[in-house]
């Protein structure tokens, strides 16, 4: 499973790139609004920092024709490895088919059902983005829905990949990783929960303290081998 950062704050992105094995950034209009900066300047800053890694940007238009126009402009501005996030409704499906003919990379977003995912894969989407926790909040099972989507793709369109989104905890991510879901995008807060430094540090401190008891003047292999 590849991990992407679901955030537009460049400070958070730089921090997560420093410590975690990530492969790109996903954004949406709400995330850009939350960042409280000019959205184009924000996206330029992100693209410059992440280089050729994946950058996912969501369109704002509702009609297929305008979605296509937006996608062309975004692709021109932010490069070939920019995935255009298109909502999976009727106008979105129409736009996906048009964009596929232009070799645009497409992420079908706002997916709540296997039916949406199936149709988006037929329309040419490269990634299908089910909203795991939002599906849970509707009274359904986001993990099972995502797994069902993967099963459908395995049988009908193995070239399309699942990009699972909307997580509240790391256990949701790990369950999908265990099943073989291709990609997950996680918030800064979820990334921080992947590593429980307090327990890890407690164990490491115990090891180091035992080692120090051998020779208090030498606290690492550097002291022994320099």
Image (spheres, rainbow, N blue to C red):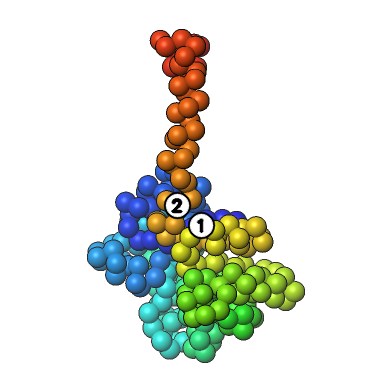
Looking at the image, which residue is at 43% across and 47% down? 17
Q: Are marks 2 and 1 in contact (CB under 8 Å)?
A: yes
- Tell me the tag on residue 193: 2
Question: In the depicted view, which residue is nearer to us: 179 or 49?
Answer: 179
Looking at the image, which residue is at 51% across and 76% down? 135
Q: Residue furthest toward the right? A: 155
Residue 107 in view in this figure: no
Q: Is residue 224 above or below residue 90?
A: above
Mark 1 lies on residue? 170
**Residue 195, position in %: x, y?**
47, 46
Q: Is residue 198 above or below residue 166?
A: above
**Residue 219, position in %: x, y?**
44, 17
Residue 172 in view in this figure: yes
Look at the numbered disc 1 and give the secondary structure of its residue.
Answer: helix
**Residue 217, position in %: x, y?**
40, 10
Q: Quadrant of residue 41?
A: bottom left
- Tell me the tag on residue 58: none
Look at the numbered disc 2 and give the secondary structure of its residue.
Answer: helix
Q: Quadrant of residue 150?
A: bottom right
Q: CA distance from mark 2 to mark 1?
A: 7 Å
Mark 1: give few (<14), some (14-19) or many (20+) Cα within 10 Å.
Answer: some
Looking at the image, which residue is at 53% across and 87% down? 94
Q: Is residue 220 above or below residue 68?
A: above
The N terminus lies in which quarter of the figure?
Answer: bottom right
**Residue 18, position in %: x, y?**
42, 43
Point out the tag, 2 or 1, that comes first from the N-terminus: 1
């Amino acid at each position: 499973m590849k991990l992407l950062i679901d955030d537009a704050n460049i400070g958070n992105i730089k921090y997560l790139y420093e410590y975690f094995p990530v492969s790109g950034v996903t954004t949406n209009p709400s995330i850009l609004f939350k960042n409280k900066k000019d959205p184009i300047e924000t996206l330029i800053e992100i693209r410059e920092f992440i280089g050729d890694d994946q950058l996912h940007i969501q369109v704002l238009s509702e009609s297929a024709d305008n979605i296509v126009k937006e996608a062309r402009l975004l692709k021109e501005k932010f490069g070939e490895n920019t995935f255009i996030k298109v909502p999976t409704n009727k106008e979105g499906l129409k736009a996906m088919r048009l964009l596929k003919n232009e070799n645009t990379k497409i992420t079908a977003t706002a997916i709540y059902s296997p039916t949406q995912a199936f149709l988006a894969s037929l329309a040419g989407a490269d990634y299908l983005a089910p909203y795991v926790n939002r599906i849970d909040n509707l009274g359904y099972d986001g993990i099972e829905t995502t797994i069902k989507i993967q099963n459908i793709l395995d049988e009908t369109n193995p070239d399309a990949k699942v990009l699972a989104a909307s997580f509240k905890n790391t256990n949701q991510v790990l369950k999908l990783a265990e099943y073989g879901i291709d990609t997950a995008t996680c918030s800064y807060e979820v990334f921080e929960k992947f590593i429980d430094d307090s327990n890890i540090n407690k164990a490491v401190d115990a090891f180091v303290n035992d080692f120090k008891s051998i020779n208090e003047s030498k606290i690492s292999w550097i002291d022994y081998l320099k």
